[in-house]
Amino acid sequence: MSDHDFKQYDFEHPSILFILEDKLRTLFGGPVLYNAYFNTFGLKGNECKSGHIRELQIPDSSFDVISVIHAIHDIAPEDGQDIVKTLSLTLKAGGFFFIREPAKRSHGLPAEQIRSLLSGAGLGEIAHEESKSEYTAKHQKYG
């Protein structure tokens, strides 16, 4: 079975642990935890959104900063570019896109593939760190 076939099978037949983790994260994570965290700094206008980017109905150019941590590699390969473009549309021109992704062959995406997805969505890399297991970078939206 190729890497692509394995990843596709994983999306089509998620394990019970994956389903449980996803439900718990939706129930307890995201907005419940992070919005309270933002408030401790007295930041105004900050909001953590949780859900499918296509269903959240976020207006274009809404955010100055987007942070994506260990999520892009879990998107079905055929949906990756479209979802990253949708995220990019919600970012203001000149806004920053921070990303941290596993880059192992056994789990994650190669750094070049991540760069290609982001570049294809109008995001240019301005700083990065790479190791054998992880890609971390700061990108900026053109325009």
Image (spheres, helix red, strand yellow):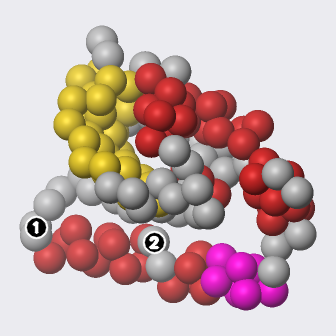
Q: Is residue 41 visible?
A: yes
Q: x, y percentage for residue 135?
A: 37, 51
How dense is the environment of label 2, judged by Cα within 10 Å: few (below 14), some, or many (20 and up)? Answer: some
Can you identify the residue that label 1 sits on? Answer: 42
| Residue at 14% from the left image edge and 61% from the top image edge | 43
| Residue at 88% from the left image edge and 57% from the top image edge | 1
| Residue at 76% from the left image edge and 37% from the top image edge | 78
The quarter of the image holding the C terminus is top left
Image mark for residue 28: none
Q: Nearer the viewer, residue 52 or 109?
A: 109
Check if mark 2's residue and mark 1's residue have beta carbons within 8 Å.
no
How dense is the environment of label 1, judged by Cα within 10 Å: few (below 14), some, or many (20 and up)? Answer: few
| Residue at 58% from the left image edge and 56% from the top image edge | 105
Q: How many marks?
A: 2
Q: Is residue 7 left or right of residue 12?
A: left
Q: Is residue 120 left or right of residue 93?
A: right
Q: Is residue 1 left or right of residue 131?
A: right
Mark 2 element type: loop
Residue 20 lies within the magenta run: yes
Amino acid bearing label 2 = Gly
Q: x, y percentage for residue 103?
A: 48, 54
Q: Magenta-highlighted stretch: main secondary structure?
A: helix
Stretch of the chain drawn in magenta:
16-22
Image mark for residue 30: 2
Q: Nearer the viewer, mark 2 or mark 1?
A: 2
First in sequence: mark 2 or mark 1? Answer: 2
Q: x, y percentage for residue 128?
A: 25, 42
Residue sitting at the far left: 42
Q: Is residue 67 visible?
A: no
- How far apart, in angstroms, are the residues tagged by discs 2 and 1? 18 Å
